[in-house]
Amino acid sequence: MIEIDVPIWAARLRVLREGQLWNRRELSRRLADVADEESRDRLPAPEALTEELRRWEAGERRPDERYAELLCRAFDVDEATLFVGDAAGTTLWHYLTGIPLLPGMFAAEEEERAGRAIETPGRADEETVRYFKALVGAYTRADRRPAALGNALRSVFTGIDGFRRDAGSSARRAFLLLAAENAELISRMDHESGDPDGALAWSDEAMSDAHEAADVLLEAYTLAQRGGLSDTTDHPDQLVAIAVAARERAALPPRVDALARHHEAQGHALAGDLDMCRRRLEESAESLAVPGDDTPYVIDCSQEAHNTLCAGCLVDLGQATGAIEILEKEPPRTVSTFATAFALARMAHAYAEAHERERSAELAGRARALARQTGAQRAMRELAKVHIPPQRAGHRRILV
């Protein structure tokens, strides 16, 4: 077995933390949350506890009994799993590759099989594909910070990329398809976390992998999602062309068709074409109303997502009143997600354009707080466009 420069328990502590997408400061907060009142009062300041976590993960110091109990509570594992266990090989391969470890998600034999395949890609088979597909699915969620999700998915992509190059022919195409889906998810997370260049680069990767795999539906899907990056470029007409190409690629399932028309509408709005924008939005709504779609890709086709997009298009076209009418029909959920932060920012923008000062300011404040909490940089970019109208004539507008 390959040796590492820290004790196996220290390596396990790090991979468990990273699997939860927590940095050390976040874990220190979690330890305080799971402590009883007496224990919480005895904890050091957050900065000191964060430094203590660094020492534990470096193997410089082992947590005492009090901290061990708190760590087990935070990770929802028993002490044997955290500090002893019989899965040293599993800990080791996750530690060396950075591929997230989620205890309890896979059986021990599945972890061992995946580790052996990582070491010798020629061993990869359908079970390995299922393992990594489940791992990608575990990080397809909106209740975590998009930058953290993107980082986790990048580590998974690195593992998948090794298989698509070196696995046997029977599994290679399956990994190529999974690579395309994973790259597309990373593109969206980069988009949400404020990295437009990264979003476009990962979108390029997704489209290239889908094309290489010769999967027409997946290629159309990646093209349709590329159209959703229209607010990261000064050339929306190019992304309109991509969304059109997605629809022309094949006969699309309703949800993928709706996605392509959604994003084409966004591009038309940014280009100032009201008629084409409205037409594509109407067509996308018709596609969403078609029942029985079992498209295997992760697509947000909720009514809230549709309304937010429609309203955003109207704001871009200078139709603020129409945007408000749509948004008030389906207000954003109260759940703390980066998508909710963006929806609130869109609402604040619409009200500002309609010169409704108080409502715009209230929504902008909520959106800003939630964007900071969830790491929603896309929402912050939207808020940068919001100018609160002055209370009295002659005053300059104030940037939120």
Image: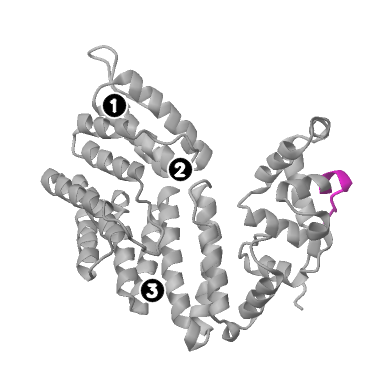
Residue extending farthest top: 392
Circle 2: element type:
helix
* Residue under pointer 3: 209
**Image point 23% across, 42% down: which residue?**
313
Q: Is residue 66 magenta?
A: yes
Circle nearer the N terminus (3, 1): 3
**Image point 38% across, 67% down: which residue?**
206
Crowd rating for badge 1 (residues with CA inside 10 Å; few <14, some 14–19, many 20+): many
Q: Magenta part of the protein: which range?
A: 60-68
Relative to 99, is 81 on the left or the right? right
* Residue under pointer 1: 352
Choose between 54 and 281: the one closer to the eye: 281
Query: How many angstroms separate mark 1 from mark 2 (CA)?
Result: 21 Å
Choose between 194 and 308: the one closer to the eye: 308
**Residue 334: image x %, image y %?**
46, 34
Quadrant containing the N terminus in the rendered view:
bottom right
* Tag nearer the camera, 1 or 2: 2
Q: Answer above or below: position of 64 versus 311.
A: below
Query: How many angstroms separate mark 2 from mark 3 (CA)?
Result: 28 Å
**Residue 195: image x %, image y %?**
42, 52
Q: Give the residue type at disc 1.
A: Ala
Colour style of the rendered protein structure: one colour
* Residue under pointer 2: 338
**Residue 230: image x %, image y %?**
28, 52
